[in-house]
Image (cartoon, grey):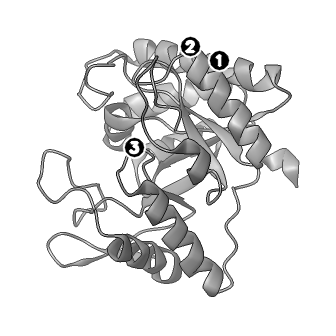
Amino acid sequence: MGESFGPWRMGNDAELMRYISSANIACGYHAGDAGTMRETVELALRSGVEIGAHPGFQDLQGFGRRNMTLSPQEVFDVVLYQVSALKGICESGGGRLHHVKPHGALYNQAARDPETASAIAGAIMRLDPRLILYGLSGSSLISEAKKAGLKTASEVFADRRYENDGSLTPRSGTNAVITDTSEAAAQALGLVLEGSVTAVDGSRVAVAAETICIHGDGENAVAFARAVRGELGALGIAVVAPLQDNDG
């Protein structure tokens, strides 16, 4: 969320806040700007939604979805810089940063590359070891964060398709993104209730689900969030953000 930039608007953050428990807010490198960051933080605070930093590669033109080759030290530095900015904005408004979730190509790179994942975890530990790291379920991002001593939340996706190894289908493919509301809601329910998802080749893949992602830039983001929240609520499943260790 918070991916608007200057006069250019993206997503419907105000409406989405009604259905979510935590928000990943862009930190200005792949999207967003200083004013958008502040406004989105204030909106989350008013809505009672936990705030997460969403750092990515410095790639406004590519929306942070193009691969970049950075050293582990460079990854550490860009994550530390971006998360620090959002953390400061959050605290200036009387709030507290809850988690960090890398964005786009940085997220996917960290999911498969332990060095990148370790650099991200190290930056978060340096800044605030209470922060939770949201990462792709079963990925290096989760395992390296645990090694570093961070609390993690294994993330699954309502609006993305999966490969048979538990990775996300690359966006370069024609079937990477789910656009049908009923399909997105059904996938989310399957992930929560069964701990598995149907891959693009038809196989069933076991996936631990601790937090569900819906992309705020998607055309049907609000409809997806409303449907997923409604389906879970109908089954008596509460939607709450993971607790930081010092929250009890």
Q: Secondary structure at mark 3?
A: loop
Residue 37 relative to residue 215: left or right: right
Q: Secondary structure at mark 2?
A: helix
Residue placed most toward the observer, 114 or 82: 82
Q: In percent of the image, x 43 and y 80: which residue is there? A: 190
Label located before the other in sequence (3 or 1) = 1
Above or below 48: residue 100: above
Above or below 69: residue 162: below
User: Residue 57: percent from the left, percent from the top?
Assistant: 37, 22
Q: In percent of the image, x 42 and y 69: which residue is there? A: 207
Residue contact at pointers 2 and 3, CB within 8 angstroms: no
The quadrant holding residue 174 is bottom left
Residue 219 relative to residue 195: left or right: left
User: What numbered label is drawn on residue 217?
Assistant: 3
Residue 134 relative to residue 158: left or right: right
Above or below 130: residue 15: below
Residue at which label 2 appears: 81
Above or below 238: residue 78: above
Callout 1, which amino acid? Ser
User: Residue 11: percent from the left, percent from the top?
Assistant: 45, 42
Determine the CA span between mark 3 and mark 1.
Answer: 24 Å
Label located before the other in sequence (2 or 3) = 2
User: What numbered label is drawn on residue 190?
Assistant: none
Callout 3, which amino acid? Asp
Q: Secondary structure at mark 1?
A: helix
Residue placed most toward the observer, 145 or 18: 18
Considering the image in quadrants, where does the C terminus appear? bottom right
